[in-house]
Image (cartoon, grey):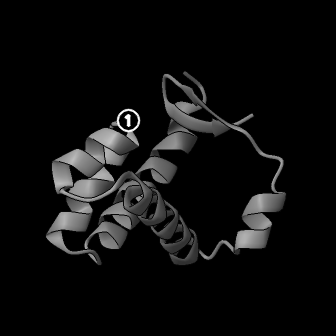
């Protein structure tokens, strides 16, 4: 439990940033993002939103690039990163 005090500000910052970023999308895109974030597969999302699996894959990459840009992460820096994120009971932590 000693890591929790340091995690709270990071989690709060993420929640604020994520909501701000998410608000930049239209209603349909926010729903697609929510479906993908919930772990739904590409085919299910495509069927639900009346598009093709390839378009959902394109959108997924577009959303990823948008998030990285919002966070100030360059694509080359993200690709070069050796950091692996693992979920623990308190959230995401670099391993």
Number of marks in the rendered image: 1
Residue 11 higher or lower than 87, as above or below = below
Classify residue 79 as left or right of residue 61. right
- Which residue sits at x=57%, y=69%? 68
Classify residue 33 as left or right of residue 85. left
Within-10-Å neighbours for mark 1: few <14, some 14–19, many 20+: few
Classify residue 43 as left or right of residue 65. left
- Which residue sits at x=75%, y=34%? 95
Kindly identify which residue carries mark 1: 39
- Which residue sits at x=78%, y=67%? 77
Where is residue 52, by image quadrant? bottom left
User: Front-most of 23 and 16?
Assistant: 23
Q: Secondary structure at mark 1?
A: loop
Where is residue 71, by image quadrant? bottom right
Q: Position of residue 54 (x, y in %)?
A: 44, 57
Where is residue 21, by image quadrant? bottom left
- Which residue sits at x=39%, y=63%? 55
Residue 82 higher or lower than 77, as above or below = above
| Quadrant position of the N terminus in the picture | top right
Q: Position of residue 50 (x, y in %)?
A: 18, 57
Q: Position of residue 32 (x, y in %)?
A: 27, 56
């Amino acid at each position: 439990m000693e890591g929790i005090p340091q995690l709270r500000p990071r989690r709060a910052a993420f929640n604020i940033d994520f909501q701000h970023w998410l608000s930049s999308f239209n209603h349909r895109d926010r729903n697609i993002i929510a479906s993908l974030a919930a772990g739904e597969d590409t085919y299910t999302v495509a069927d639900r939103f009346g598009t093709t699996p390839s378009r959902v894959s394109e959108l997924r990459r577009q959303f990823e690039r948008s998030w990285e840009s919002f966070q100030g992460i360059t694509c080359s820096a993200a690709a070069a990163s050796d950091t692996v994120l693992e979920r623990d009971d308190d959230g995401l932590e670099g391993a």
